[in-house]
Amino acid sequence: MDSRGRPREGMPRRTFLAAALAGVTTVVLASCTPEPSPTGSPSPSPSPSPTFTPRPGPDGLPRLTAMRRSRWGADPYALGAFSYDDVGSTEQLRVALSRPVRDRVWFAGEACSTDAPGTMQGAIASGEAAAAAVAVRAGDDERVVVVGAGLAGLTAANALVRRGLRVVVVEARDRAGGRVDSVDDDDFGGSAQLGALLVGEDADAVAELLDEASVDTLLIDVPATALATDRDWVPIDPAGVEAIAEAHDWALTQPQDVSIATALVGSGAAAALSSTPDAHGVRATDWLAHAISSGVEVATGAPTSRVSAVSIDRDRLRRTLRVVQGRLGDVIDALTAEVDIAVSSTVTHIAYSDDRVSLRLGTGESITADRVIVTAPLGVLKTSTIRFEPRLPLTHQRAISLLGMGVLDTVWLRFEEAFWRTDAPSGDASASMPDADAPAATPDVLTVVGTSPTVAAWIDIGRPTGEPVIVGVIAAAQATRLESLDDDEFQDEVLAALAPFATATD
């Protein structure tokens, strides 16, 4: 351990590239009603269907027929996608956040996880841990309120119900699920997953829930090629990832934490990269930019100027993932079956003493309980949305302040044909289904190198069924920028970002 309590080797953190998508589903702001009238077991109701108006795309693109997008950074019940390690963050901050306050108030969610922060796995584990701690201290007739009907909150609630406690889950949204947002839409095979989408192969708790809910997943390959500016597919050069690893090693020797951006300069790793273009016009410096845009920013939802260089796990920059091939909301349906949930309420104030807690709602009404588990996301805790009385201990305040909250969004697009697949048939792309087990002529994950991408990566989610459906991943500053655009402006931006793949060569 160093003087800051960090291991001298890279701390276990989430993988880069699409792995961060698995971490979008973490926790959600929930709220509370007065002596709530539980709704029973509400399913994750679909988001309102917007009126979709296709616009003319760049020349050469088939007609866009459907679009769905997320806006997690602007969502008042989320204010971000998942937590990340900002400069100065330590594993101990997450531990501190998970500690009980007077044995009355607990926090749970991915931000409290040290093993898998920013992931569904972390949310589940944190919910289970909080429930176990509450159960040890709670009497037989105690009442526990769980604030939040996302994955962490529902996991905690189910664990407490199994232990025989009286439990009510309260939720700010009009649905359960939090950032598991399965939007019903026949254009996307029945539903589009606007929240969690990818699952790590080591996420055992998630895999168990998926299996119980009969939700299938499909293995996707780690991308080996990227599209160069000359429209050729070129092998991904490890120079960028290696430069980040060198910056990480250098940061470990420094007296205090620094950002990845600072470490890349201070270590000399960035300066050592060649700026001479190869036959495709790609420079070694371009591969560093590629590793940042399609790796660091996707994994954290933040720019390298904010992400801790010490906490980057250089051994997990790339790994194999599984993409959800069904309705992830079915997992939420299963978790809501045995718990009482009150939706469409907002907690504004939590007062706690040595013997009880009181929660006040936006309506001015209140509810009293013996203990509470708060699964509001870190982004919400950073605001004054929920006031605590007395104020939280300084250790909790410090953790909330120093841990970062990233922004990451997805956009689902359906076209008349899958023009980005070099092996796709013309016309009705679903008429001739490609062999899912055969090597793809184009990769499952599409990225560009040599330019600053608006969309960090594209996932060809429709390939297994032959459907002309693709999902874009938008991260960090680009996500924040695009969230401010209306649907027409947004559509123009993402179609322009996808257009280069229409003219790619084998």
Image (cartoon, grey):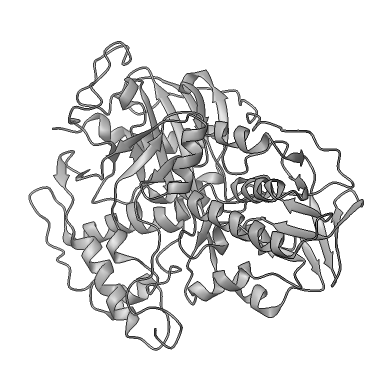
Against 464, residue 386 (above or below) is below
Residue 179 quadrant: top right
> Going 18% across and 62% down the picture, which residue do you hit?
239
Residue 226 quadrant: top left
Q: Position of residue 205 (x, y in %)?
A: 48, 47
Q: Is residue 283 visible?
A: yes
Q: Is residue 402 visible?
A: no
Q: Locate residue 426 relative to residue 199 in the image: left or right.
A: left
Quadrant of the image containing the N terminus: bottom left
Q: Of all residues shown, which one is farthest toward the left?
A: 279
> Going 40% across and 58% down the picture, which residue do you hit?
14
136 or 5, which is in the foreground?
136
Against 27, residue 428 (above or below) is above
Q: Position of residue 455 (x, y in %)?
A: 38, 44
> Going 39% across and 89% down the picture, which residue do you hit?
255
> Going 70% across and 61% down the picture, which residue do you hit?
134
Quadrant of the image containing the C terminus: top left
Against 287, residue 330 (above or below) is above
Q: Locate residue 269 relative to residue 475 in the image: left or right.
A: left
Q: Position of residue 360 (x, y in %)?
A: 86, 56
Against 47, residue 357 (above or below) is below
